[in-house]
Image (cartoon, rainbow, N blue to C red):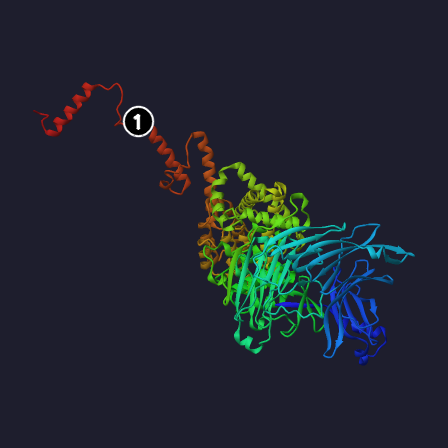
Amino acid sequence: MIQLNSTFDLQRDVISGILKKEETVRATAGKYVSDPRILGVERDGGVLYCWRGETGTTRIGKYDPHSKHNKLLYTFDKQVCVSSCSLNKEETLLAVSLTQKHRQEEGLKPVSKCLTLLIEIHPINNTKVLKAVDCRVRVQFLYPHSVQSSVLESHLLLITEDGYVDQFHVMLARHEGYRVVMLNPDRLAKDRVVEEFSWVQWDSHDQRLYYITCKERHMLKCVQFYSQRNCETVFELPLDLPSNPFISVSFVHLGFDHYHEDGRGDKGISLVVFTDKTGSMCVCYSHPVSGRKEVRYTIAFVHKGCSKTFNVALDQEALSRNTHTHLQPLFFCTGYYVVVFLAGHFLHLLNTRQQDLLCYSFFLSGSDACLGILGGASVVGTQDAAFLLDLQMGRIYMASISPAHLLELLREECPEAQRLATLQCMLVLKGSDPDVERQVIDWISDSVLSFEAFDQIQEFILASLYRITHQQSLSLDMVLPYSSVFEKKELPVALTMIPGVKCTPDLLPQPLFKRKGRNAQGFWAELQSVCERVKYFETVQSPRFRTSHMQNTIQTGLSSEKRRVSHQQHLEENTKKVLSMMDTWRLDRRIVPLFQEEDPQQKALIGLMVDKLREHLNRHLPQLGKKRIDALVVNYVAKLLEQVHHMLEMLWHKYKLGPQVLCLKQKASAEEWSVFHVMLRILEATKGLGLPLPPGYNSLLSVLGVKCVSHHSFLQFVDHGLLQLTEPFVSRIMKDLDNSNVNEALKFSILKRLPEAMLQRVCHLWDHPVSSACISREYVRNRLQNRDKSTGLALDDHEHSSLWPDFLPLSYLTKVLSSLEEKALNPFEEQENIDARFVEETALKQTLIQLGLEDK
């Protein structure tokens, strides 16, 4: 899982170069170069190291990883024990902390005496004793951001085991054009930065000092150093640490002291702080081990306002094989994953962005829990966030997550939660690599069925969009979807737990930022903004945009909003913005026939999604401004369509498809059938999320469908809504297929399923008596309707349309006769001016005749 790339090797990068320079044969290397050790790494990546020469000297050098050159900095004329070392940015001053030793009968033993020196090395000149104390001292030069200044000045931190930090301000002067010397070395200005700490960590990249005070119960503080020789405490956070967490003062990322045994063992704790420029902070610490049955550690996600404590049951069989193993885990960071490693037991990679569910993190045990070439017996230290040091071999590695191993996990038979974590990691962390993205698409196309816990295509779309939009604006992290899992009504149990691991979530107290509002800058401004957003979103229901809610909105919106002309025009404008943006992307590389037709349904979905997403962002992130939100939303929907199109392009390349796909006269190949199957899954996935598809997608899918499946199955797909009879598709069917019995039956079946308006537009494309009759009927209808306008007859009477025959001339004659009949007098209706006497006599006469009484 963890890939280690060697960035420095004492044997390869230093010793071999020294031997070549001194023209010494390799066989006598031990006489001239002995006891090489890594001392530390500066902000510019330079590695400080020391070794002992043939005559008993001790030398300190620097390796430049950019130029691959070594530079000798200083030589002691006797053997000394260098416990800490730092070089200023201009490489004119060297600070060294020496652990002094004396000889006794038992041999060499360390004594509690430390000498701290400040040495001029450009050229080698004066040496200033800064400290001579009975405790350990770490030295560290500040590396301020490049600021043009005529004053030569360096700033040095002295961190002592007594619990205080001093900052020395060293003024320099240039003599004879090249010599740099200290001004007033006997009167160096210094400031007390920190007092009474029990744990301290140096962040060389961002020039920060984290520490935990003794007088305030477990209060984590941070001092930020600036270029203008000033510093200030910018951050405070109370931590819920165990009682008496540190047996002795702990130095983190302040070089490597090879002469001090870390006696923490299993009784104390290890604690590390990781930050990211995106505004995330994680505080990781272990708990004292009791009973050797389980290991407990806590990850505090400061940027999320919560923490998680894990209790991991240990493999007792593995413990019995190695009873001397310390049970304090190692913490380091790679990407946005915090890694917790316990050799021989487990490797836990925690996702610091999506910590909601355990299924977004990796937990490996057994043989999978390893750090590449670093074996369980290696003494491993950390230098900065993602750098590991093999103290025995003298090597520094940069840790990263291996894409090849991720792909193996994706294809292996493993729990679905692990596959989901793997897919998320490949898409979000490694997805910018085209080769990784291609491998994911290949895996999706090769997977015949979806998983029970999640849908691969939905995860691909949402995770890819999350990666793209997260780079554009960090504020979108909490309002846009990143996984389809949360669209489910009930989360599968497999995604909410890890066998053998107990997780206890908790809320963190609100951190205190010393700088407020506009005074906050850089990382601290971003972290403060993130924490404030977290506090706001805790009070809001459903702050994250749910695409499943879009489905009902879209279905009701398309039917009701059509009546509102202004709103319909607004949606059309949204669609035009999205499609015009896509027209500027990769025009020369498009090989899939999409975006080439009018697709009213998909265009309406595109416009409506832009409208709803814009409304959601304006509600929760108004500080971004309407113009920026509009640009983000249009880009988001355009990227959504582009992701679907990109998937199809990769499939086209994989199966080597060409223009013959649209030819209905040819039978479908096995490759076309595979693409049809994946396109059906894409359709199902987007429907489940209520997402639009690129215009022309349904037409292309129907073309593949009519070629790949039987006509009977094709019509069933149409009746069940899987395939759509779009006008471009029906037009192609009518023109490309001949009038064989099979094709004629298919065309009849398709025409029967078309709405009347489309039927009238496409029937003339079929050279057949039925289409001729349809055309004739329409022609007669139009002519008679034109005549009706002058006579006042309404041929299209929907109330009685079922009573008239389909033969239009007869229908027209019937309508004329009916109209005349309605105008004729009804003999049974009462008429005015009737002779009542005449009616009575007539009625009496008729009665007599009927009764046979007329002659009487």
Q: With 155 as the anchor, is 559 left or right in this view?
A: left
Q: Does residue 706 sit above or below 32 in this rendering?
A: above
Quadrant for the N terminus in the image: bottom right
Q: How many marks?
A: 1
Indicate the quadrant where residue 82 lies. bottom right
Is the residue marked by circle 1 packed among few (<14), some (14-19), or many (20+) residues within 10 Å? Answer: few
- Residue 824 visible to an observer of this rendering: yes
Of residues 156 and 643, the one nearer the viewer is: 156
Q: Residue furthest left?
A: 856
- Residue 430 visible to an observer of this rendering: no
Residue 535 location (% of width, % of height): 56, 48
Q: With 840 as the anchor, is 106 left or right in this view?
A: right
Of residues 649 and 18, the one nearer the viewer is: 18
Q: With 365 as the anchor, is 257 left or right in this view?
A: right
Q: Residue furthest right?
A: 176
Q: Does residue 728 sit above or below 797 in this rendering?
A: below
Q: Which residue is mark 1?
A: 825
Question: Circle 1 — which element?
Answer: loop
Residue 40 location (% of width, % of height): 73, 65
Residue 712 location (% of width, % of height): 44, 59
Q: What amino acid type should be assigned to the residue bearing mark 1?
A: Leu
At x 63%, y 50%, the residue is 527
Residue 397 location (% of width, % of height): 69, 67
Of residues 379 and 742, the one nearer the viewer is: 379
Q: Does residue 215 sit above or below 295 in this rendering?
A: above
Quadrant for the C terminus in the image: top left
Of residues 496 and 24, the one nearer the viewer is: 24
